[in-house]
Image (cartoon, rainbow, N blue to C red):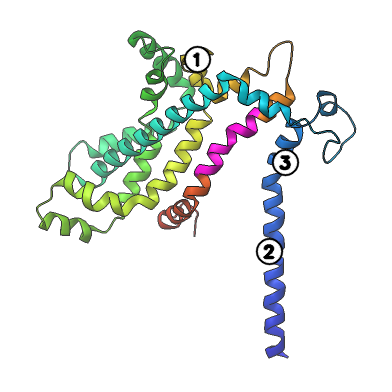
Amino acid sequence: MSVVGNPVRKRVELTLRYAVLVVLALLFLLPLYVMIKTAVSQPEDVTSKTFVWWPSNPNWGKFAEIFADERFGQSLVTSAIMAVSMTVGQIIIGALAGYGLARIPNRASKPLLGLTVTMLLIPSATTFLPNYLIVSWLGWTESLQGIVIPTLFTAFNVFLFRQFFISFPKELEEAGKLDGLGYIGTFVRVVLPNSLAFAAALTVLGFLGAWNAFLWPLVVAGTGFGALTVQVYLSSFITAQTFDYTGLFAAGFLASIPVLLVFILLQRWLLRGVAETGLGGS
């Protein structure tokens, strides 16, 4: 019985596991379905009390209207430049600062680490006004540098990189030093290439945060055409007088495609980075 029962038990466990995964996948895909369904619905169907799984007369023309809007294309380009610049800058600065705190002996290391941890405890809302005053004094309002530069340093990245480099194998660094490499050379040629998985995990998180940023780009750049981001563009569908549901959901779906592509391309590195750093728990 045990010989026969084991394959049956494994088959049941496998079936239950796939069933749970299917249910979770459907739950995660539900918002995507709602976005597409609302985008192709007629305005009167959106506010109707009668629920339908799919509109009988889909209006695919809303996507064509969004693509024809020059402001949407410009907002995608601006958000892409902003998100890539912010993400790359945050990773580089976080890696350099984290490696310095973890590996370079200095009397200021512990005070700087304490300051970094303290910055993690400070709500971002309290630094919003001082940052804006500095940006305004520099004349960077309504520009990309005003949005990007103040966000390049993140205490979160510095702290996580520091924790990662503390557990980094010292043998690899010692091999680099035997080859005559200094701290910078060891970091660039030895440490950084072996930290790509962890950096990729933070890259996904950073890109998501940068792409979805709304309040800071709105305050610094406003709704002007020059530095209009996609999230600020989406807010234009909501006014005090009107609420364009179909346009908002159509533009929101199109704006989510770059984020999905980044996640799909980096998901292998993301899972590997989480496994290596223990962020997922054990």
Q: Is residue 170 magenta?
A: no
Residue at position x 43%, y 27% in the image: 82
Residue at position x 74%, y 31% in the image: 60
Mark 3 residue crowding within 10 angstroms, few (<14) / some (14–19) / many (20+): some
- Gap between marks 3 and 2 measured at Cα: 21 Å
- The label on residue 18 is 2
Q: Which residue is mark 3?
A: 33
Which disc number belongs to residue 219? 1
Q: Residues within 10 Å of mark 1 (few under 14, many from 20)?
A: some
Residue 191 placement, left or right of 229? left
- Cβ–Cβ under 8 Å for marks 3 and 2: no
Helix, strand or loop for disc 1:
helix
Please identify, in this view, whether the residue under mark 3 or under mark 1 is nearer the observer.
3
Q: Is residue 24 left or right of residue 210?
A: right
Question: In the rendered image of this protein, does residue 164 appear above or below residue 248?
Answer: below
Label whose residue precedes the other's in the sequence (1 or 2) = 2
- Magenta span of residues: 251-262
Checking the image for residue 243, the label placed there is none
Task: Name the side, left or right, on which 255 lies relative to 83.
Answer: right
Q: Amino acid at mark 1?
A: Val
